[in-house]
């Protein structure tokens, strides 16, 4: 059950991070934008949560 919750949270973080990065790409000087930085951080956190949920899912078996 906890792995499903972590997967959903990971997907939400990945989606939100992707939205922030896509918004930053439409602006000039992209890599210095706060949207770019926070988007990358959220995507990284979402990816780590997704990997953690997969690990927990296989550890429960």
Image (tube, rainbow, N blue to C red):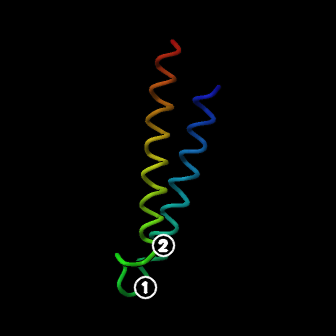
Residue visible at 50% across and 69% down in the picture: 20
**Residue 30 pos. (x, y %):** 37, 79
Q: Residue 40 lies in what quarter of the image? A: bottom left
Kindly identify the residue that appears in the image at 44 percent across and 45 percent down.
Answer: 47
Residue 38: give its label. Answer: none
User: Do labels 2 and 1 touch, CB within 8 Å?
Assistant: yes
SS state under label 2: helix
Disc nearer the start of the sequence (2/1): 1
- How many labels, in total? 2
Q: Which residue is mark 1?
A: 27
- Vertical position of residue 18 compared to residue 7: above or below: below
Q: Is residue 35 above or below residue 46?
A: below
Q: Position of residue 23 (x, y in %)?
A: 49, 76
Q: Which numbered marker is on residue 35?
A: 2
Secondary structure at numbered mark 1: loop
Q: Is residue 4 left or right of residue 46?
A: right
Q: Is residue 28 left or right of residue 58?
A: left
Cα separation, mark 2 vs mark 1, equals 10 Å
Q: Within 10 angstroms of label 2, few (less than 14), some, or many (20 or more) residues?
A: many
Residue in the image at 43% along x and 85% along y: 27
Instruction: Tell me the quarter of the image containing the N terminus.
Output: top right
The percent coordinates of residue 18 (x first, y second) are: 48, 63
């Amino acid at each position: 059950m906890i792995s499903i919750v972590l997967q959903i949270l990971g997907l939400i973080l990945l989606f939100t991070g992707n939205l922030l990065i896509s918004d930053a790409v439409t602006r000039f000087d992209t890599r210095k934008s706060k949207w770019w930085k926070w988007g990358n951080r959220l995507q990284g956190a979402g990816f780590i949560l997704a990997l953690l949920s997969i690990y927990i899912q296989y550890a429960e078996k």
